[in-house]
Image: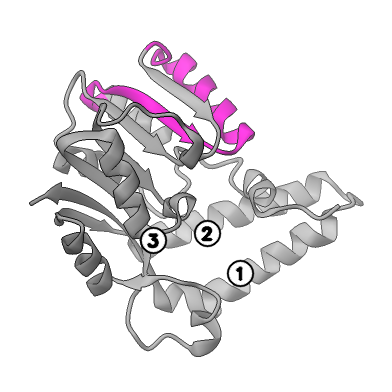
Amino acid sequence: MNMNFLALKDISERFMEIVNPSSAEKMLKVGEIAGLKAGDRVIDYGCGFGETLALWAEHFGVGGVGVDIRPYAATRAREKMARLGFADRIEIVCGSATDYPAEPHHFDVGACIGATFAFGGYRETIHALKQVTKPGANLILGEPYWRHPLVPAEFAATEHFHTEAELVKITHEEGYAFKGILRSSEDDWDRYESGNWFGLIEWLKEHPGHPNEAEVRQHLLESQQEYFRFGRANIGWGMVVLSPV
């Protein structure tokens, strides 16, 4: 039986905590720019293993909800909140971002870091976050982008990203402006990609002869080839804080 993309992510990310090309320092800085403070309610769509919410709970005193479609990720996030003593103020929900019944205009800050595909794209995610946050709330999005317009056609055909200028244009059209941006460094990218490769390689060592062995190996090799042929030179990633204007 073939593995889907999410199952492969469960394997590749199992030794990671932050599942985006970023760092704890940058996650805290973006929270500072967004004005997070004690008592704020935050919703984080695509929360992964809950590391960002845990950092914000510890350093800013926020509470809120994390939503992730992967049972493995949601379970790890819940265990983390319990271990750190945040389970009473951080709820982790396993399910689709579009299906979560959030109360309209309830949250002080809305976040979707590296998971805008859950809503269909960057613009659609702004719409979704606006619906669940209070009037005047800041939004936090993490998004890949083309570093330049001269992307090889072979690669551009497989990915549907915007340039940063296009992201700014969409943001303005939706009534927001960038309050701040934190881009991934090459070290952030290398650490993120290496973390994924490590998880895949360890799984292959632990599961010789597994029915999905060839598929996992192929995913590993293709991800490395794509990263060094195209990705490292052409794709950027950054977190932006959007403020209504």
Q: CA distance from mark 1 to mark 3?
A: 16 Å
Q: Pick whichever of labels 1 and 3 is earlier in the sequence.
A: 3
Q: What residue is at 18 percent from the left and 41 percent from the top? A: 138
Q: What residue is at 81 percent from the left and 55 percent from the top? A: 2
For label 3, the residue is 187
Q: How far from the left and from the top, in percent, is residue 136?
A: 12, 39
Q: In this rendered view, identify the residue nearer to me: 180 or 65.
A: 65
> What type is the residue that disc 2 sits on?
Glu
Disc number for residue 193: 2
Q: CA distance from mark 2 to mark 1?
A: 8 Å
Q: How far from the left and from the top, in percent, is residue 13?
A: 58, 46
Is residue 60 rendered magenta in the image? yes
Mark 3 crowdedness (10 Å alpha carbons): few <14, some 14-19, many ≥20: few
For label 1, the residue is 224
Q: Is residue 170 left or right of residue 48?
A: left
Q: Is residue 147 above or below residue 48?
A: below
Q: Is residue 141 left or right of residue 161?
A: left
Farthest residue to the left: give it.
245
> What type is the residue that disc 3 sits on?
Asp
Q: How far from the left and from the top, in percent, is residue 111?
A: 32, 41
Q: Pick whichever of labels 2 and 1 is earlier in the sequence.
A: 2
Q: Is residue 230 above or below residue 51?
A: below
Q: Secondary structure at mark 3?
A: helix
Mark 2 in CB contact with mark 1 (< 8 angstroms): yes
Q: Secondary structure at mark 1?
A: helix
Q: Pick whichever of labels 3 and 2 is earlier in the sequence.
A: 3
Mark 2 crowdedness (10 Å alpha carbons): few <14, some 14-19, many ≥20: some
Q: What residue is at 62 percent from the left and 67 percent from the top? A: 223
Q: Is residue 223 left or right of residue 40?
A: right
Magenta-colored span: 59-88
